[in-house]
Image (tube, grey):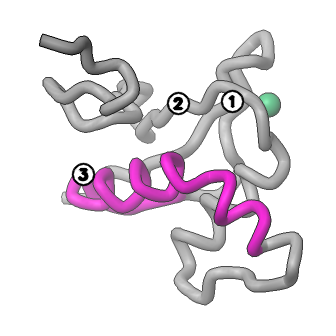
């Protein structure tokens, strides 16, 4: 069973969904999350015409180029929300010191 995954911009009201899918299965989520985490690098590369060759990743980067500073979310074709970071983990920058 496939689950089409889309990026969405949370800074638009209502939130703006990508026209093109960023993944077809839930196991694509780690790749999508990695691309969102590397947004600055991927956007800079795309602007230097180094577009990703992989279909889903190219769709992801195309959306990120259009929304370079916006808060980004991940939704699927059923309207479900998926966390942008892996569940239960915190970003290193948010980790509190012992
Ligand atoms: Zn946006």
Cα–Cα span, label 3 and label 1: 20 Å
Going 74% across and 29% down the picture, which residue do you hit? Answer: 70
SS type, badge 2: strand
> Is the CB of mark 1 within 8 Å of ligand 1?
yes
Going 53% across and 83% down the picture, which residue do you hit? Answer: 54
Where on the picture, by quarter, is residue 25? bottom left
- Horizontal side of 87 relative to 5 (left or right) equals left
Q: Is residue 13 above or below residue 93?
A: above
Q: As rendered, which of 12 and 49 lies closer to the eye?
A: 49
**Mark 1 vs 2: CB contact within 8 A:** yes
Mark 2 closeness class: few <14, some 14–19, many ≥20 residues within 10 Å: many
Cα–Cα span, label 2 and label 3: 15 Å
Residue bearing mark 3: 26
Closer mark to the observer between disc 3 and disc 1: 1
Residue bearing mark 1: 9
Q: Earlier in the sequence, mark 1 or mark 2?
A: 1
Q: Ligand 1 is located in which of the four quadrants?
A: top right
SS type, badge 3: helix
Q: Is residue 34 magenta?
A: yes
Q: State the mark number for residue 73.
A: 2
Mark 1 closeness class: few <14, some 14–19, many ≥20 residues within 10 Å: many
- Horizontal side of 89 relative to 13 (left or right) equals left
Cα–Cα span, label 1 and label 2: 6 Å
Magenta-colored segment: predominant secondary structure: helix
Going 65% across and 62% down the picture, which residue do you hit? Answer: 41
For the N terminus, the quadrant is: bottom left
């Amino acid at each position: 069973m496939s689950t089409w995954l889309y990026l969405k911009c949370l800074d638009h009201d209502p939130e703006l969904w990508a026209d093109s899918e960023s993944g077809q299965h839930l196991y694509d989520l780690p790749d999508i999350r990695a691309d969102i985490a590397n947004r600055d690098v991927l956007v800079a590369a795309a602007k230097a015409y180094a577009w990703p060759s992989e279909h889903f990743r190219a769709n992801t980067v195309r959306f990120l180029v259009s929304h370079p500073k916006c808060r980004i979310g991940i939704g699927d074709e059923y309207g479900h929300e998926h966390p942008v970071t892996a569940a239960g983990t915190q970003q290193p920058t948010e980790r509190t010191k012992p």
